[in-house]
Amino acid sequence: MRALKLVGCFIRTSLQEEAAYRANFWISLFYSVLNLGSGVLGIVVLFGQVESVQGWTLPSTLALLGVYLCVTALRGLFIGPGLDSLAGMDGEIWSGTFDFTLLRPVNTQLLVSVRKWRLFSLADLLMAAAVLVTAVMMLGVTLTAWQVAAFILTLLAAVLILYAFLLAFAALVFWSPGVMFTWVFDGLFQLARYPMGMYPGWLQLVLTWVIPVGLITTVPAQALTGTISWAALAVSLGAALILVAAASILFRIGLRRYASASS
């Protein structure tokens, strides 16, 4: 309950901060529409030449894009802002203000993960939901309770996997404060908006087992279209739990390496 109250306070504070810069909403909205348009246009152009790619049709690929946009929106809403303020450009580790965060009587990982919210991303979330609804309508199927439950579980797993990698890359900054590790992840994550079957075999392996951005988008899309297997669902959930645990351990080890700015 204490954690939920803190999250509520952080959301209200973030809303007050963003309300002071209302022009940013329109800039963010323009960028979101541009990102949505480029993604949809790329899919339309692709399937204007072929009917399917490794079993992926236009509606199912549109569902995958919707999942990508949804996960991206959730990252922008509450995962990215907090971790970026810790390990991003001019973040607390670089500026030496992380000392004040450590002094607060709250679990440090929880604090850095939920203290910043970018509520403008709710518009991105609505756009993602519109894409998902459109994809389901194009599929011409009625979602079963199993499909809805599997989609919710795999989407939750996707968000946890994304959080685990961003937390791990943020923790690596304790060893190399001058390196922006998340840039590597961002470059690979862009590839997750399209089916893994489009890429060469070696890249599919990297995107599935090394940095599993494929699990983040492909598995929820399969759940929504009714093509997911029990094995894929179990792998997704298991990978999410293992990666979050591993990232938390790495973060705690990084905390022990942190040298106070006042020392």
Image (cartoon, rainbow, N blue to C red):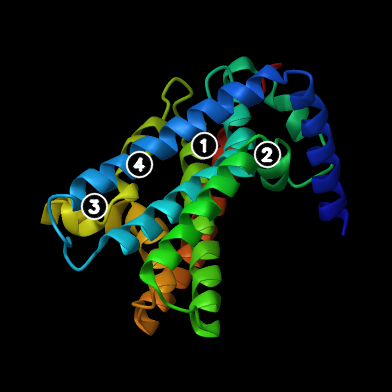
- In terms of depth relative to the viewer, which is nearer, 202 or 62? 62
Badge 1: residue crowd in 10 Å (few <14, some 14–19, many ≥20) = many
| Distance between the alpha carbons at the discs numbered 4 and 3 | 22 Å
| Distance between the alpha carbons at the discs numbered 1 and 3 | 21 Å
Amino acid type, label 1: Ala
Residue 108 locus on image (x, y percent): 71, 42
Amino acid type, label 2: Val
The mark closer to the camera, 4 or 3, is: 4
Q: Label 4: which residue? A: 39
- In terms of depth relative to the viewer, which is nearer, 80 or 93? 80
Q: Label 2: which residue? A: 112
Question: How many numbered badges does the structure rendering display?
Answer: 4
Q: Earlier in the sequence, mark 4 or mark 2?
A: 4
- Give the residue drawn at x 83%, y 28%: 16
Badge 4: residue crowd in 10 Å (few <14, some 14–19, many ≥20) = some
Q: Label 3: which residue? A: 206
Badge 2: residue crowd in 10 Å (few <14, some 14–19, many ≥20) = many
Q: Secondary structure at mark 4?
A: helix
Residue 139 locus on image (x, y percent): 37, 70
Residue 162 locus on image (x, y percent): 48, 51
Q: Are marks 1 and 3 in contact (CB under 8 Å)?
A: no
Q: Label 1: which residue? A: 170
